[in-house]
C-alpha cells in the first residue's frame, strides 16, 4: 500500500478551491446563469489558456445540458490550486487523466498516481473515480482506455459518522450542479467497493509532497522577514477612512481627526483615494488636506480603493494615478470578487497586480474577505505572487455560526466557539494561513467598527468590539490591526473609539 504523507500545501489549496466552488455554487443548477457562466467563462476559458494544445480541446457546445462537465470541474480545480498540464492530464474526460495517473503509478513517477481502491487510503486532495451509468470498467481496463462513462470527485475531508468512516467529496455535474457526497470507507480506511457505479480508482495527489515540510519552514521564515520589510503604513495599529469629507464633518476638522488617531495610538491610516471611478478635484483636495493633518501627527498613510475588475489594466492605471494625485506611495487594493458585481478571474488578478506592482513606488497590500475558503481562494493565492501583505476584513457580526463550526476546526482539532469575535478572528486567520501555505504573506487584521449591515445594531457592534478587545491577544501573529472605519456614517462611535483607545493597541507586540 502506498505510503501516506502529511497533507501538502497543494492538497490543502485544492481542497480549499473545491470547497469554495461548493460554497458559491452548491445547489445552483447548470442552466442558471451564475453557474453556466462559471463553467464557460472561467472553467473552460482558463483551461484553454493553460492547455491550449489539448487533444480533445475545450470548445464545448453552448447547450450545457448536452455534455457532462464533471471532468472539466475536476481539471479546473486542479489548475486553480496550482497544477500545470504537465502535473495533471486535464481533460473533458475523466478517462484521460485516469489513464495517465495509472501509467504514473505503474512507472513510479509523476505527480498524480492512480491506485486500485483496495490498495490505497484516500486523503483530502485526492480524487476518487467511479463508473457512471451501466459502466463496469476496472482499474486494469482503465489503464488502456480514454473514453467511457465515469465520474470523478475531489476528496475534501475524512469524517466519522455513527461509527463509520467516510471520504467527503466535492464534484461537478452532480444533479446538474456542484455537490458534496460521502463515500464509505472500510475499517482499514480504503474505499468500500459497491455494486452500483463501481469504483475504478483513487488518484493520489503527490504534488508538493516531497518539499512540503521544507517549503512550510521556508515560507514561515519568509513571512517573518517580509513583515519586517513592510512599509510603516502596513504595520501596527491603524484604521480605514472611507469618506474624508464625512469624517471631517463628524470630528469638526482634519486636525481633530488626526488628534483622535494619535490618542488611540494609531501608527497608520488608509484613506480612500478612488472608487470604481477616479475622484474629482474637490474630493482629492479634501482628502489631501486630511492626509497632511494626519501625517503631521507622525501617522503613516496608504491610499486604498475599490477595484471592480471589468478592465484590470485600467483599474491598475487608475490606482497608480490616484496615488500620484494624493502624493502617496503605498497602496491597498480592495478586491472582493462576487461582491457589488465585481468579478475577477485568476488571469485578471495577475494582470492587475503585475501592473500595479510594476508602477508602484511603495508597498502593496490586498484587502478582501475574511473566511477565504468561501470566496474563491485561488484568486488571492494568485495575488500572493505580487502583494506584500493581505488584509482580511474580519467583520465578526454574530460569527462563527453553526455552519462554520461544522466545517472548520482549529489546527489542534478543537472547535471554534460560536458567536464570538475573538474566535472568529482565530478562524479567519487560521483559514488564511492554510490557504497561503507555501506563499505565506503577512496578515493585517481589519476589525469591525461599524454597524447597520445585516441588521447589526449599533449596540451589538459596540458590545462585540469590546469583547474582541478583551478576549483576543494574538497580536504577534499579525503585522497590523486596523478598523473599518474611522467615523463618517455608521462607523466608530464614541464608545468604540474610547474602548480602542483604552486598549492601547499601539503598545502591542505585532509580528
Image (tube, rainbow, N blue to C red):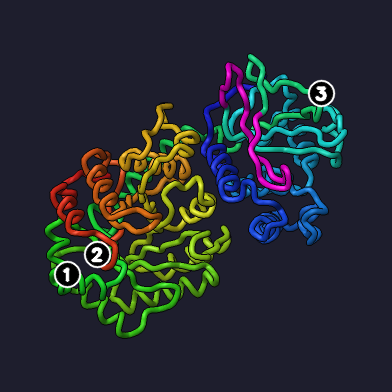
Please give the range of residues in magenta: 159-182
Q: Residues within 10 Å of mark 3 (few under 14, many from 20)?
A: few
Task: Using the numbered discs, state the Cα–Cα distance from disc 3 to disc 1 in whole angstroms.
Answer: 72 Å
Residue 467 versus residue 410 in the image, above or below? below
Residue 508 showing in the rendered view: yes
Task: Using the numbered discs, state the Cα–Cα distance from disc 2 to disc 3 in whole angstroms.
Answer: 64 Å
Callouts 1 and 2 close, C-beta under 8 Å: yes
Q: Is residue 89 left or right of residue 382?
A: right
**Front in this rendered view, residue 470 or 272:** 470
Work out whether mark 3 precedes mark 1 in sequence or the reverse, and give the earlier one. Answer: 3
Q: Residue at x 80, y 59 (%)?
A: 63
Give the prevailing secondary structure in the magenta stretch. strand
Q: Which residue is mark 3?
A: 195
Q: Describe the element under mark 2 as helix, strand or loop.
A: loop
Task: Using the numbered discs, state the Cα–Cα distance from disc 1 to disc 2 in whole angstroms.
Answer: 8 Å
Q: Which residue is mark 2?
A: 487
Q: Is residue 174 magenta?
A: yes
Q: Describe the element under mark 1 as helix, strand or loop.
A: helix
What is the quadrant of residue 22 in the picture? Answer: top right
Horizontal and vertical percent for residue 332? 37, 63
Residue 251: numbered disc = 1
Q: Extreme bottom residue here?
A: 281
Q: Is residue 279 left or right of residue 434?
A: left
Q: Residues within 10 Å of mark 1 (few under 14, many from 20)?
A: some
Horizontal and vertical percent for residue 10? 55, 40
Q: Residues within 10 Å of mark 2 (few under 14, many from 20)?
A: many
Residue 281 versus residue 232 in the image, above or below? below
Amino acid at each position: 500500500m502506498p505510503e501516506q504523507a502529511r497533507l501538502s500545501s497543494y492538497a490543502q489549496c485544492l481542497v480549499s478551491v473545491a470547497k469554495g466552488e461548493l460554497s458559491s455554487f452548491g445547489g445552483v443548477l447548470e442552466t442558471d446563469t451564475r453557474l453556466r457562466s462559471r463553467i464557460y467563462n472561467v472553467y473552460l476559458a482558463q483551461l484553454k489558456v493553460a492547455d491550449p494544445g489539448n487533444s480533445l480541446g475545450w470548445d464545448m457546445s453552448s447547450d450545457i445540458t448536452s455534455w457532462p462537465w464533471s471532468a472539466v470541474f475536476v481539471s479546473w480545480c486542479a489548475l486553480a490550486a496550482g497544477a500545470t498540464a504537465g502535473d495533471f492530464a486535464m481533460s473533458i474526460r475523466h478517462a484521460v487523466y485516469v489513464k495517465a495517473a495509472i501509467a504514473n503509478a505503474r512507472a513510479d513517477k509523476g505527480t498524480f498516481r492512480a491506485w486500485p481502491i483496495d490498495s490505497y487510503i484516500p486523503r483530502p486532495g485526492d480524487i476518487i473515480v467511479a463508473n457512471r451509468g451501466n459502466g463496469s470498467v476496472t482499474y486494469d481496463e482503465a489503464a488502456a482506455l480514454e473514453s467511457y462513462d465515469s465520474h470523478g470527485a475531489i476528496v475534501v475531508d475524512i469524517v466519522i459518522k455513527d461509527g463509520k468512516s467516510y471520504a467527503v467529496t466535492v464534484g461537478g455535474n452532480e444533479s446538474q450542479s456542484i455537490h458534496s457526497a460521502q463515500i464509505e470507507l472500510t475499517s482499514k480506511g480504503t474505499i468500500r467497493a459497491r455494486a452500483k457505479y463501481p469504483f475504478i480508482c483513487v488518484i493520489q495527489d503527490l504534488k508538493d509532497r516531497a518539499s512540503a515540510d521544507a517549503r512550510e519552514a521556508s515560507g514561515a521564515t519568509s513571512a517573518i522577514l517580509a513583515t519586517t520589510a513592510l512599509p510603516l503604513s502596513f504595520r501596527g495599529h491603524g484604521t480605514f477612512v472611507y469618506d474624508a469629507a464625512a469624517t471631517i464633518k463628524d470630528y469638526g476638522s482634519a486636525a481633530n481627526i488626526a488628534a483622535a488617531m494619535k490618542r488611540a495610538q494609531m501608527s497608520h491610516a488608509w484613506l480612500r483615494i478612488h472608487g470604481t471611478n477616479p475622484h474629482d478635484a474637490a474630493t482629492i483636495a479634501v482628502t489631501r488636506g486630511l492626509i497632511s493633518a494626519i501625517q503631521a501627527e507622525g501617522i503613516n498613510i496608504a491610499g486604498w480603493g475599490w477595484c471592480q475588475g471589468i478592465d484590470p489594466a485600467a483599474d491598475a492605471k487608475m490606482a497608480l494615478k490616484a496615488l500620484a494625485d494624493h502624493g502617496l506611495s503605498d497602496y491597498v487594493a480592495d478586491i472582493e470578487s462576487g461582491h457589488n458585481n465585481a468579478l475577477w478571474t485568476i488571469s485578471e488578478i495577475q494582470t492587475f497586480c503585475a501592473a500595479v506592482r510594476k508602477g508602484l513606488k511603495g508597498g502593496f497590500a490586498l484587502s478582501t474577505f475574511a473566511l477565504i475558503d468561501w470566496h474563491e481562494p485561488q484568486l488571492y493565492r494568485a495575488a500572493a505572487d505580487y502583494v506584500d501583505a493581505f488584509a482580511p476584513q474580519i467583520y465578526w457580526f454574530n460569527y462563527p455560526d453553526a455552519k462554520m463550526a461544522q466545517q472548520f476546526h482549529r489546527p489542534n482539532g478543537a472547535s471554534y466557539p460560536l458567536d464570538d469575535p475573538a474566535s472568529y478572528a482565530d478562524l479567519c486567520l487560521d483559514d488564511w494561513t492554510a490557504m497561503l501555505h507555501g506563499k505565506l504573506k503577512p496578515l493585517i487584521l481589519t476589525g469591525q467598527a461599524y454597524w447597520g449591515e445585516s441588521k447589526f445594531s449599533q449596540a451589538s457592534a459596540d458590545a462585540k468590539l469590546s469583547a474582541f478587545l478583551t478576549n483576543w491577544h494574538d497580536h504577534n501573529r499579525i503585522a497590523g490591526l486596523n478598523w473599518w472605519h474611522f467615523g463618517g456614517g455608521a462607523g466608530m462611535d464614541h464608545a468604540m473609539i474610547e474602548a480602542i483607545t483604552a486598549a492601547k493597541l499601539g503598545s502591542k507586540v505585532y509580528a
